[in-house]
Amino acid sequence: MQPKSLTPESFPSAGLVAYFSMEIAINPAMPTYSGGLGVLAGDTLRSAADLGVPLVAITLLHRKGYFRQHLDSKGVQSEDIQAWNPADFLTEESPRVAVSVEGRTVAIRAWRYDLKGCTGHIVPIYLLDTDLDANTGWDRGLTDHLYGGDTNYRLQQEIVLGMGGARMANALGLRVNVYHMNEGHAALLTLALLESQLGGGPLGQVEAADVEVVRQKCVFTTHTPVPAGHDRFSSEQAIRILGGDRTARLEKLGCFHEGLLNMTMVALRFSRYANGVAMQHGKVSREMFPEFAIDSITNGVHAPTWISEPVQQMLDTHIPSWRRDNLYVRNAIDLPLPEVIQAHALAKEELLAEVASRAGLVLNPKVLTLGFARRAATYKRASLLFTDPERLLKIATEAGGLQILYAGKAHPQDEPGKALIRQVIETAGELSNDMLRIVYLENYAWDLGALLTAGVDVWVNTPRRPYEASGTSGMKAAMNGVPSLSILDGWWIEGCIEGVTGWAIEDGANDAEEAASLYDKLQNSVVPLYLQAPEKWAHMMRTTIAFNGSYFNTNRMVTQYMRNAYYPVQLTEKARVEEAAFAS
Ligand SMILES: *Cc1c(COP(=O)(O)O)cnc(C)c1O
């Protein structure tokens, strides 16, 4: 089966794309996501709906949600379950399907959420649920916790998501011709497709042609730049939970890596197309998995979801078509500067009001305000800004004041991440004075993320290279006219035009050197521009919206998935040979 080229004639009849993701940020009131991966999935679906792409999504229900973060005065994190009532948001579907887990039969149902785009087109999202009378107590909890439990629980969830999801799509009567795995969690859907291809016959009889039939239906996006980040399971676990025959077959088909069942390998082996999530990440992924041709499609964010109300109003006035086609945001280059300044001031006011209500601290809207919000993983180096406290205090004084807003959850089992939060909060307490105010805000989630990225003056990101596959919070900031001051990793390699859309922290040999570059840029570039050249600063906000807002959005990204992954334009033999020659 050849994938069809995307033409106006073929597109509507081409069948559906089924997008599989362990987490999806669907609605701020539904705790079905933890962070970047889920937000990206939600933004992808919102853009697919805006663009009228024939696509459905499949995920797990996460009845007990991701956790709500509480921080005590010392910065010790505790976690509360975020229970919610699915029936308040979702419609139950009638089909039931089953999967085999550890030799038990687990029944699955689906709930539907209709995501409506600005064009009126709908992308249905199916959330799988095992909380059924037919299941044992343990199995009823398999769709409760997002990233909770141990690797046994995770593999069992992945069987429900991948194999259960593929069977549910079938039971719902969906005519799917592209299965998109958003990260390796859903890779076992390929096993369900392979079994279906064999008509229930023994896996031992699988032939290369059967694998090829599955490959032609599947595409895969990897999000992880380091080997340890990939989902892996021991052979013992796989045999016990997935079954001996299936495990043996996956091993024979080359899905093991360093003795472990590796979900990235499963997905790569069974996909006709694979990509990383930024140009640099594609390259890193090709080095990690040299056997595979891994392309790059740079992430984006859903513009109307992440642009603040005041900036949206400004765009509506000057660029009415920007929602439906984000390319028009390029015309922000002509926005009147006083309106840009005013829109940002309103967004900053709204953020500072939220800080006052959450933290009881009144910040000054005139003072330069930096934002740093992301999962508290050690590679993100949240405390890099505190490497040289004296220098930071000196810069704050020169700037006539400096405000730094932090937020971020640590994974419940990530002790080093939790220690990092304690360290940031402790240092913040020691350093804060009249000139330097540092606040760590509790429970970073969708709503707070939107306020922060829109309302601060500069978005700071300090990952250790090459750990940041893409990053998307800086893109949200850019759409709101907020420049970034960041390490050249992930999307920022593509998005940084020095002094035009933000500033690069120079690569150094160690943390201390990179911290020194961070201080240099802050002291010599950011602060002087903010204090002495408000007109030039406004100029920078405007070019940031025009250049980066018009590109780092999911409207562009989904279009690239259509052209390169879902319905690739078939190259002539000559063009293919020429492109290969350029690439090598
Ligand atoms: C956008 C977003 C993220 C991802 O941002 P990164 O730049 O990848 O850290 C994570 N969490 C929330 C709540 C977000 O809104």
Image (spheres, rainbow, N blue to C red):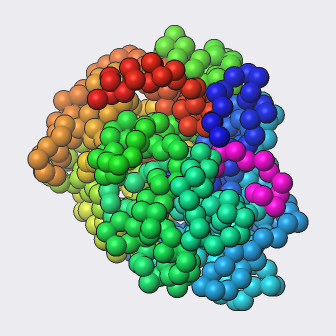
Q: Is residue 181 magenta?
A: yes
Residue at point 72% right, 89% down? 136
The image quarter containing residue 577 is top left
Question: Where residue 42 appears, x then y in whole percent?
Answer: 62, 48
Residue at point 88% right, 66% down? 94
Q: Quadrant of the C terminus?
A: top left
The answer to which of 135 and 216 lies nearer the viewer is: 216
Residue at point 40% right, 67% down? 256
Q: Is residue 32 magenta?
A: no
The answer to which of 331 and 453 lies nearer the viewer is: 331
Q: Compared with residue 456, is residue 258 higher up or lower down, i.e. above or below?
A: below
- Note whether residue 290 is visible: yes
Question: Where residue 282 appears, x then y in whole percent?
Answer: 37, 41
Question: Where residue 330 appears, x then y in whole percent?
Answer: 52, 17
The answer to which of 562 and 520 lies nearer the viewer is: 562
Q: Compared with residue 575, is residue 238 higher up or lower down, i.e. above or below?
A: below
Q: Is 479 positioned to the left or the right of 200 in the image?
A: left
The image quarter containing residue 231 is bottom left
Residue furthest bottom in the image: 137
Residue furthest top in the image: 334
The answer to which of 421 and 211 lies nearer the viewer is: 211
Residue at point 82% right, 70% down? 96
Q: Compared with residue 299, is residue 232 higher up or lower down, i.e. above or below?
A: below
Question: Where residue 364 appears, x then y in whole percent?
Answer: 42, 41
The image quarter containing residue 534 is top left
Q: Quadrant of the N terminus?
A: top right
Q: Is 268 positioned to the left or the right of 116 in the image?
A: left
- Note whether residue 308 is visible: no
Which region shows up in magenta?
Answer: 169-184
